[in-house]
Amino acid sequence: MRGWAAYVLALAAAPALAAELPLPEAAELTAEVSERLGSFQLPVGPARPAGVAMLTIEGQVSHQAFRIEGAETTLELIAPLRTTLQAEGFSILYECEARSCGGFDFRYEAEFLPEPDMHVDLGDYRYIAAAREAETGTDHAMILVSRSAAAGFVQVSRIGPPGDSPLNLVVSTKSPEADGDVMAETVAKAVAAAPRLAPDVIGTLTATGAVALDDLDFASGSTALGDGPFPSLALLADWLKADPARGVTLVGHSDAEGALETNIRLSRARAEAVRARLVSDFGVAATQVAAEGVGFLAPRASNDDAAGRMLNRRVEAVLR
């Protein structure tokens, strides 16, 4: 992790509503749009055949987009922003990553800033919608994070209660020398504490044919599944037991630490551990669940840092 020091985002002009969101010092403002009074459709659910669930909000609307040169993953970018929102009294209304959001459909039904100011990789983005009560009404925030091969992209939007003064999103700087170590430590803790999302498991599985069970917990190099609870397993078990003709293959994935053959065995053992849990604790028929492992052959993030390796250690359910 590098470069987390200089930029902070203030979500509101009024001191009572101020919430500073940390961005890396390499952040460059690429777009800024605001309305004194407007209407905004805030996504609060995944894309489905009927569309994306939207919350219609009226008030002061402001958007900013940033480009951040460097190798930070989307998790590294969004985790400290989420932590800060919650510390400032925001409650998370909805959060998702690319596939559980709904991929292409979610991206293009929502009111995100356009290219090139806000680039969105349809296979690698993360989203948060949040709200908190203020004296003058409800304050809403929206964060979208994605990246290209060379840079990260962040959009931060705020929809606040109508007021006499226009809403501004202000970028200010702090001393990297004074705050760099503290900010780096804050980001590292936020990434480590970032929740593993339990996505719309069945909706994603039936719509795309596969879903990552991201709330499962495996340590690096270990085949032991944590104690849970794991909501994704409960949802998957209920869906399987509702129809004996249904079946899935659990596919284990590893990070890139070690040899491929070793990681294939490790990833298969993790998938077997999940299969065993579904059968023993949730009562799923053994014939409905198979287990395989592919090691590090299908990463979804860089293996160059701890956050990426954590994302790559996963088990996916694949329809069969």
Image: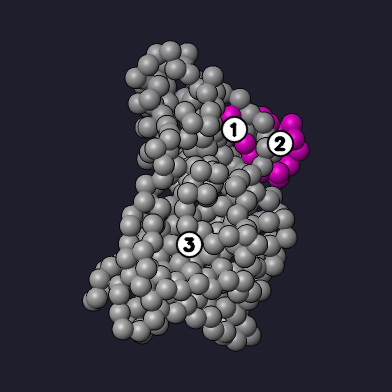
Identify which residue, 304 or 100, lies in the foreground. 100
Give the percent coordinates (x, y) of residue 34.
Answer: 46, 74
Between disc 1 and disc 3, whose residue precedes?
3
Stretch in magenta: 250-265
Is 299 located above or below residue 39 in the figure?
above
The residue at which mark 3 appears reads as 143
Reply yes or no: does residue 254 show up in magenta.
yes
Disc sitting over residue 297 in the figure: 2
How far is the residue under mark 1 from the one under mark 3?
30 Å
The three-letter code of the residue at mark 1 reads Gly
How far is the residue under mark 3 from the one under mark 2?
31 Å
The three-letter code of the residue at mark 3 reads Ile
Q: Residue at x 54, y 62 (%)?
A: 113
Crowdedness near tag 1: few (<14), some (14–19) or many (≥20) residues, C-alpha within 10 Å: many
Give the percent coordinates (x, y) of residue 1.
Answer: 65, 65
Horizontally, residue 123 falls left or right of residue 198, namely right
Identify which residue, 167 or 16, lies in the foreground. 167
Reply yes or no: does residue 123 show up in magenta.
no
